[in-house]
Image (spheres, grey):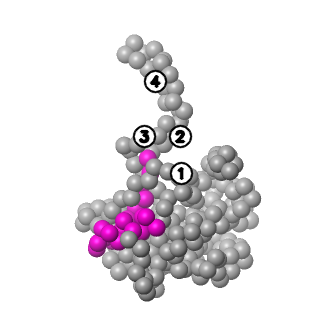
Amino acid sequence: MPKTDGETVKAVVLAGGLGMRLRPLTDDRPKALIHVNGRPISEYQLDWLSASKEIDSVTFACGYKWEKLKEHFGSSFKGMNVEYSVEEEPLGTGGAIKRAIADADGLVVALNGDILTDLSLARMLGAHRQAGEMTASMLVVPYRSRFGVVKIDKLRMVRGFDEKPAFPDVWINGGVYILDPRRLTKYLPDKGDIERETFPKLVTHGELLSFPHYGDWFFVDSLKDLKELESSIRTAA
């Protein structure tokens, strides 16, 4: 279901983290400007948001070295207005979203600043609209082990190996959310994480929808993650 005439959709990119596990790359820039094969990860994200043809504006929820973000993107990107919600102190994901969506009058797409995916955002937005009066939708992706799995039999003999297998029936939070500010704001903390303080309440009230995705999904939390993502992009190209 596409957006209706007059409906606005705002995106919020959570880019306030210090990126400690990516030092020294984040010594002089926020994590959102870490390069992936020569381009900032946030450029890939804004390309993805723009490609959906749904997003009118993007707000970076930022803090650490946020001026670098503003220098890079300015006030627009591919037809989308770009704004900056600057935290004087860390507010957590819930507090950052609450501050960034204070003036939103339509649906909001919120995403972690270290996520890249080939998810069809238009399809996820359509599913949220189709569900009716739903407070939030969450991207979920199959859990993939960070370790290789050793297969053994009843005699404890090793029979094989599976390198970093995926478990299709075990889901994890994919870090992309569709939010209805009119219904969500009362559940958001002024300071705290949406994952710990808001989503459990929505589950209790039956107001959190999942959107499963089996396609590409990457997060960049360490130098190892960055190298694996760069290798995957080069291979796909």
Residue 208 spot, x, y in % from top left:
32, 64
Quarter holding residue 102: bottom left
- Is the residue under label 1 in contact with that under label 2 (CB below 8 Å)? no
- Foreground mark, 4 or 1? 1
C-alpha distance separating marks 2 and 1: 16 Å
C-alpha distance separating marks 4 and 1: 26 Å
Kind of residue indicated by mark 3 = Phe
* Label located before the other in sequence (2 or 1): 2
- Foreground mark, 1 or 3? 1
Foreground of the two, 169 or 5: 5
The stretch of residues the image draws in magenta is 122-142
User: Which residue is painted at 69% across and 56% down in the image?
Assistant: 36
Identify the image quadrant of the N terminus. bottom left
Q: Which residue is mark 1?
A: 216
- Is the residue under label 3 in contact with that under label 2 (CB below 8 Å)? no
SS for callout 2: loop
Q: Which residue is mark 2?
A: 146
